[in-house]
Image (cartoon, rainbow, N blue to C red):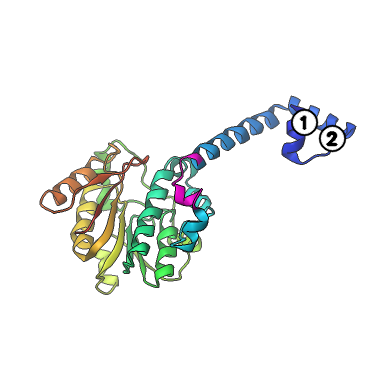
Amino acid sequence: MLSSLFKLFGLKHNVMNNRVVSWLIKNEQFNAHLVNYQKSNELQKQFVQYLPDRYTANYSLYNKQTGFFEYNDIKKWTAGFYENNVGDLSRFLALNLCIDQLLEECIVGDIAEFGVFKGNSAFLLARFAQRINTNCYLFDTFEGFDERDFKENKETRFEQDFSGTSLSSVKEFVGEENVVYVKGFFPDSLAQIKEVEGLALVHIDCDLGAPFKAALDYFYPRLQKGGFLIMHDYTSLFWPGAKKAIDEYFKDKPEFLIPIPDKSGTCIIRKV
């Protein structure tokens, strides 16, 4: 036990350090931190074990090709929303793989996200836009649900209103290079920007049925062939309005919905 702790903390094995570490072992608070550290290490090991081969064993080859994925992005993905996003790393990987595919096929176009919250996925989309030198449009109230959303929100099983954010905090987190922030109630907020066409990737995470329908009405026709449309909360069962809006919209479209096994029930289509 002691030798392991010495190695863990980089201590030399001497009498004084022996006493210090012995005291730490008896300290309840320290033990709690140590248990959490060990659990964290186990989670990291499990996470690395199930990473796609291109991000592990073939990472050097991958970097010579698209080379978009960065391990440091995992910290930003979970920042400020750790409890939710640490369990949603499969969605983080799915976003990276979609971006890889667009880069490999040289599909270039603007990026859009509707439902930004703290910016945990927006920063990744912004970095993609910077890579291909296009715009990343971020649509949100940046204040949580609008008053007009409250009626539908009360009819769901989920009570969070996502008000713990602001435009300034998201700008600080995501940055402003190649990013267009569109603040306001969607679709009214579209009046702030010029017409957007030829989108390469759209990420919708607005939770509620009416905003989801409005988003699909606007973004789907403007998504270019081969572009990805990534939709949150399709299978989560927290937001029945979102699933209903998606099902109704795509019942007469040529694309099929592909569910992703992530925490929040994402589904994806690719424009044909």
On residue 13, which mark appears?
2
For the residue pair 161 and 241, the one nearer the viewer reads as: 241
Q: Does the magenta-highlighted stretch encompass residue 220?
A: no
State the residue at coordinates (46%, 40%).
Answer: 50
Magenta stretch, residue numbers: 49-58
- Position of 158 relative to 186 (above/below): above
Seen from this angle, which residue lies furthest left? 252
On residue 243, which mark appears?
none
Q: Is residue 93 left or right of residue 27?
A: left
Mark 1, residue position: 3
Mark 1 surroundings within 10 Å by alpha-carbon count, few (fewer than 14), some (14 through 19), many (20 or more): few
- Where is residue 99 drawn, in percent x and y? 37, 59
Q: Secondary structure at mark 2?
A: loop
- Position of 116 relative to 34 (above/below): below
Q: Is residue 206 left or right of residue 41?
A: left
Mark 2 surroundings within 10 Å by alpha-carbon count, few (fewer than 14), some (14 through 19), many (20 or more): few
